[in-house]
Amino acid sequence: MSDDPHAVALLSLLRGVSGLRMFPDADGAGPTATTALPYVVAWVSVRYDLGPTIDGRSSRGVATATVHSVGANDTAARVTAGRVRGALLDVVPTMLGRRPYPIRHDDGPPPRLDESTGRRVVDQVDVYRLESLPG
């Protein structure tokens, strides 16, 4: 798991959902073509933008979590995406040394069929954003 406080906060919230199979798992492993459905794959990227500081430093952390809720059909993918939404949306996570804002939902196109692993599944992709300032 990343040592960036934003990635740690987002992934910890998802891993805290009871019964939600989450990847990458604690060991960094991802799902395989035979992983039981449903499951979630979350990718987190973090950047530091110019913050509201007088010294012009890039202190505003902005994390984007791209979350794939994968199920056997569109209903299963949407239900799993709803569990993800319940874990993330509007939550203000605890972050050491940072003052976070509530997590926001930036994008969520309709579920789509995915056969890239040789197995037919439905993938609901949602994008969440977590921003913070030093604190």
Image (cartoon, grey):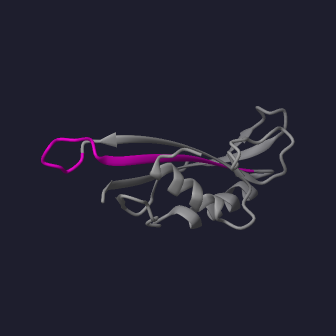
Q: Position of residue 116 (x, y in %)?
A: 76, 32
Residue 135 found in image quarter: bottom left
**Residue toward you, 58 or 32:** 58
Q: Position of residue 43 (x, y in %)?
A: 58, 43
- Asked if residue 128 is positioned above or below residue 99 in the image, the reply reads above
Q: Which residues are magenta?
A: 51-70
Q: Residue at x 81, y 51 (%)?
A: 72
Check if residue 59 falls in the magenta segment.
yes
Numbered marks: total? 0
Q: Is residue 116 left or right of residue 111?
A: right
Check if residue 73 falls in the magenta segment.
no
Any part of residue 8 in sight:
yes
Q: Position of residue 20 (x, y in %)?
A: 72, 60
Q: Is residue 132 left or right of residue 50?
A: right
**Residue toward you, 76 or 93:** 93
Q: Is residue 125 left or right of residue 48?
A: right
Any part of residue 106 in sight:
no
Q: Residue at x 64, y 58 (%)?
A: 81
**Residue toward you, 67 or 49:** 49
Q: Position of residue 11 (x, y in %)?
A: 58, 54
Q: Residue at x 80, y 33 (%)?
A: 117
Quick one: which residue is furthest to the left in this view?
A: 54
**Residue toward you, 23 or 94:** 94
- Asked if residue 60 is positioned above or below residue 88 in the image, the reply reads above
